[in-house]
Amino acid sequence: MAKEGQTGAGQSGTGIEALAGAVTAAGGRGPPPVHLWNPPDCGDIAMRIAADGTWFYQGSPIGRAALVKLFASVLRRDGDRYVLVTPVEKCGITVDDVPFLAVEMVAAPTPAGGPPVLRFRTNVDDWVACDAEHALRFEPEPGTGGLKPYLHVRRGLWARVVRPVYYDLVARGEERAVDGRLMFGVASGAAFFPMVAVETLRDHS
């Protein structure tokens, strides 16, 4: 992976192809074990993931979906920093909000006939089954009074749930007591994810 500012990365196509080659060389069957790799840090590169999920390199959008999926497979979060990682090097990138979007949801029945498990497809075509490890969280949206929903994808990497899917979540909502307080939220299998206190909903009704 070339550092930002190197001559080769400044030529059209050259830098991003070098990045892709480094990632491909580290590939194998199944998801790359990036959490096990501890390579030297090569600094930051001019790659950014916008809040709408678009990946940019040197200010230009990366138009090839396969390339975005390739880079997404080796994305890791180190503290507050997002890095692309291979066994031999890692480099930092900028993420405006979170790296992924959750763009589709299905309710999958469980073999034992219990509550359905919500499964989400991300914008890089990964499927994530929502459970205690892959939780939903809901944050206040400044200036609107609404909520921004997020899904934990893997090891500190989150996906923002897009608005149509969020509406589907709300439609599945129910009231449950959580720590002695009545909460409106959504269930996935045995897990329940509170959105907002029921009393707050009644105050705004």
Image (tube, rainbow, N blue to C red):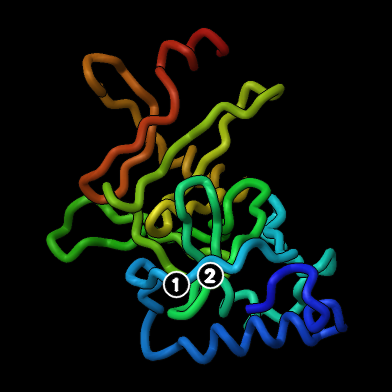
What's under tag 1, amino acid-wise?
Pro
Q: Where, by quadrant of the figure, is residue 62 drawn?
A: bottom right
Pointer 1 with pointer 2, Cβ within 8 A: yes
Residue 27 at x, y percent in the picture: 45, 88
Q: Where, by quadrant of the figure, is residue 192 drawn?
A: top left
Name the foreground residue: 156 vs 137. Answer: 156
Residue located at (77% from left, 77% from top): 63
Residue 71 at x, y percent in the picture: 58, 74
Q: Residues within 10 Å of mark 1 (few under 14, many from 20)?
A: few
Image mark count: 2
Residue 146 at x, y percent in the picture: 61, 27
The reply, left or right, for residue 162 in relation to residue 126 is right
What's under tag 2, amino acid-wise?
Lys
CA distance for labels 1 and 2: 6 Å
The secondary element bearing badge 1 is classed as loop
Furthest residue in direction left, as rendered: 112
The reply, left or right, for residue 95 in relation to residue 39 is right
Residue located at (21% from left, 46% from top): 190
Quadrant for the C terminus, please.
top right
Say whether disc 1 or disc 2 marks the residue closer to the N-terminus: 1
Name the foreground residue: 186 vs 68. Answer: 68
Name the foreground residue: 56 vs 18. Answer: 18
The secondary element bearing badge 2 is classed as strand
The residue that disc 1 covers is 39
The residue that disc 2 covers is 90
Residue located at (54% from left, 62% from top): 83
Residue located at (39% from left, 26% from top): 184
